[in-house]
Image (cartoon, rainbow, N blue to C red):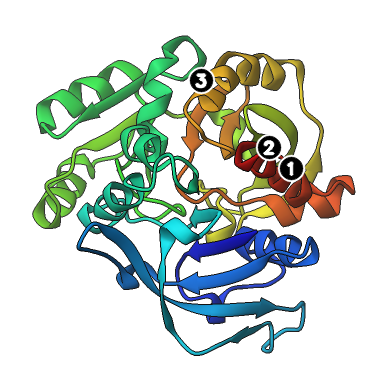
Amino acid sequence: MKIAFQMDPITSVDIDGDSTFRLAEEAQALGHTLFYYPPDHLAYRDGRVIAKAHPMQVRRIKSDHVTLGAAQEIDLEDMDVVWLRQDPPFDMHYITTTHLLDRLRGKTVVVNDPFWVRNYPEKLLVLDFPDLTPPTLIARDLDTIRAFKAEHGDIILKPLYGNGGAGVFRLDVNDRNLSSLHELFTGFSREPLIAQKFLPAVSKGDKRVILVDGDPVGAINRVPAAGETRSNMHVGGRAEKIALSDRDREICARIGPLLREKGQVFVGIDVIGDWLTEINVTSPTGIQELERFDGINVAEKIWQAIEAKCA
């Protein structure tokens, strides 16, 4: 197959942790032909969705992990698969790329399906499952957020479309910073905020469960660093081996059919204690850590699911 990766600069990824690199590595091992382009090089012209892309070869050698050929214009209809893998922010630039890629429907397999990536971003899709999630609020109005905090005492407050743990604050019962944080966030962004009741179980870890075409294949536990509330590995969280619990499987059984129906092949959900907090569809991570802990080839499972869709 001919496969194009729409992603942030591949020259700067961590080859021991980046999920997109692992997907490209496995695709190459399977004999597929790879192309790479950044989202800025995606375009629409005269009825065609095109990209200025580089032929790509990858290897597991640090600081020498990719060879890019000369840039060439490719018609994405000529690709068998296009991967939507750039990281958020989930802003209008990101959303526009999903509109352009959605024009390939019926011609090229785009993973994850861009229509539903656009309509089901991580912190909004969980709203379909209120019985699986902790008390949650989405609001921009300060009085509404104050009332939520007064009810629950100890809350997490973060940007609705943030990622990687950036801008995540814990406001406990003694905190006096809500008004200042509200001024800060609303001063540079028109987006609402999301608040959730704080879950003390996060001290034992924030579990990332990987689903492939709606089915769970395993999990890793991300433990916050000392003195830190956030467990994201971008901000010092430590990955540990962990098994899927009965509750994890119950959650996956509830959300899996919807993910499969909406073309979300590679998804990472976040579970703290018994509660689902996010359903990550834009650019989930965790493949390499799971493969190292459990000795399974997650990337191969993902490609098998994609090959079935192409067939």
Look at the image and tell me in which quarter the C terminus lies.
top right
Q: Secondary structure at mark 1?
A: helix
Q: Which residue is mark 1?
A: 304
102 relative to 201, above or below: below
> Viewed as shown, does residue 8 lie left or right of 293?
left
Query: Are the residues flagged by discs 3 and 1 in contact, CB closer than 8 Å?
Result: no
Query: Are the residues flagged by discs 2 and 3 in contact, CB closer than 8 Å?
Result: no
240 relative to 157, above or below: below
> Viewed as shown, does residue 118 lie left or right of 24?
left
Look at the image and tell me in which quarter the N terminus lies.
bottom right
Q: Could you tell me residue 152's position as x and y percent?
A: 35, 19
Query: Are the residues flagged by discs 1 and 2 in contact, CB closer than 8 Å?
Result: yes
Q: Residue at x 52, y 64 (%)?
A: 4
The residue closer to the viewer here, 25 or 169, is 25
- Estimate the spatial distance between the alpha carbons at disc 2 and disc 3, rounded to whole Å: 18 Å
Q: Which residue is mark 3?
A: 258
Marker disc for residue 222: none
Say which amino acid is labelled 2.
Answer: Ala
Q: Residue at x 62, y 55 (%)?
A: 237
Q: Secondary structure at mark 2?
A: helix
The residue closer to the viewer here, 97 or 179, is 97
